[in-house]
Image (cartoon, rainbow, N blue to C red):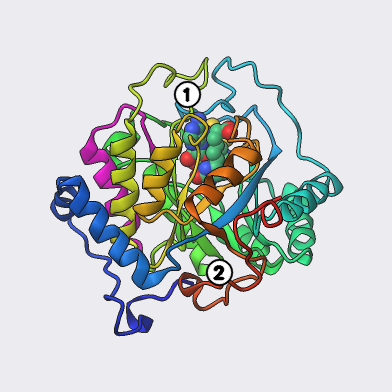
Amino acid sequence: MAADASSAPASQPALRHDWTRAEVEALFALPFNDLLFQAQGLHRQYHQPNSVQLSTLLSIKTGACPEDCAYCPQSVRFETGLKKEPLLDVEVVLEAAREAKDNGATRFCMGAAWRSPKDRDLERVEAMVRGVKAMGLETCVTLGMLKPAQAERLAGAGLDYYNHNLDTSPEYYGKIISTRTYEDRLDTLANVRAAGVKVCCGGIVGMGEEQSDRAGLLQQLANLSPHPESVPINDLVQVAGTPLKGADALGGIEFVRVIAVARILMPASYVRLSAGRTAMSDETQALAFFAGANSIFYGEKLLTTENPQNARDRALLVQLGIQTEGAVAPAASAEASASCGAGAAAASTSCCG
Ligand code: SAM
Ligand code: DTB
Ligand code: SF4
């Protein structure tokens, strides 16, 4: 897990898990330059300043999900025109993982449109995890709610990360999802932790929420102890047919504020500039990296929607002088002091495909 308060070197401020809403809102209220200066300063104390980690996503089971998450094209309740697909064969997944590795990704994230996995489906997912891990990639899955025994099975297969997002503030949550509670999500996160699997947990912004909801989401994440090792910040991808199509989009400056506040609250964690990059300008992404984002989804598809073309991402990283982390897995005890540089090359065509 990420270095936590007890293990942080003296040069790094102790990690906190007792943030108040007022403190988080005060960070949002800082002048933009002061906020970014603080975030960038902390970023440099915990991470390589010009390095980004690449994760590639694959939808291993698509659509027909019984949940009603208002942002999601995969819910069975919304007419989004998405073609449903049953759980993929292991070989198909391993082929996609090989390609992701060849393109420079160091983590392969497999997502399933389930409320929670059935025990009989887990066997195939375990085989996927074992196969992807054997290629030298880090593994991540997101399968919905997990019971303790299911988390333990995935841990036994060697799973590195489980992604399960809180999505928004506790107050706004009821406007977005009715079929599972905030508490359900916290329970799954606790089961994942207890099984010894690292936590990838973040949320979505641009869903019509207020700034205080964005503060509330980050407060919840930062008060998890330990912090999630990986914090994906998604900018809503609006999909026709979902209730959130037409929601007020978040401006780039406010999006960058969210990244900066996440970096300040969880300085040792990886903050991932996640969904929504296709619609984002290069300049907004550059500011997000300055604010402390140090991971992206790389590859031309997220789960069901588009991600930037590889060539666009390569050009952006080269332009910014940002290197991609090498394919060497970080030491289990100190993800935050990561291994960028080990095997990493400049963000050139030779590195990220
Ligand atoms: N079904 C599982 C679950 O919800 O836990 C796993 C897959 S689900 C698609 C994973 C995450 O993707 C969601 O928690 C949400 O944060 C994000 N997501 C889904 N649709 C999105 C969209 N349209 N824009 C941005 N993020 C989205
Ligand atoms: C996360 O926080 N974002 C990813 C991953 N975890 C699974 C998913 C984004 C999905 C965007 C909509 C889609 O492509 O279906
Ligand atoms: Fe289902 Fe996950 Fe989409 Fe919600 S976010 S509808 S649980 S696939």
- Residue 226 or 119: which is nearer the viewer? 226
What is the magenta range? 204-224
- Pointer 1: what residue? 238
Relative to residue 353, is residue 204 depicted above or below? above
Q: Amino acid at mark 1?
A: Gln
Residue 302: say if magenta: no
- Pointer 2: what residue? 340
Of labels 2 and 1, earlier in sequence is 1
Q: Quadrant of residue 225?
A: bottom left
Q: Secondary structure at mark 1?
A: loop
Q: Quadrant of residue 214?
A: top left
Relative to residue 174, is residue 41 depicted above or below? below
Is 297 left, or right, of 49 in this rendering? right
Q: At 78% across and 63% down in the image, what residue appears?
A: 135
Residues at badges 2 and 1 in contact (C-beta under 8 Å)? no
Disc 1, ligand 1: is the CB inside 8 Å? yes
Q: At 64% across and 27% down in the image, what residue appears?
A: 64
- Residue 331 or 293: which is nearer the viewer? 293
Relative to residue 142, is residue 335 depicted above or below? below
Q: Secondary structure at mark 2?
A: loop
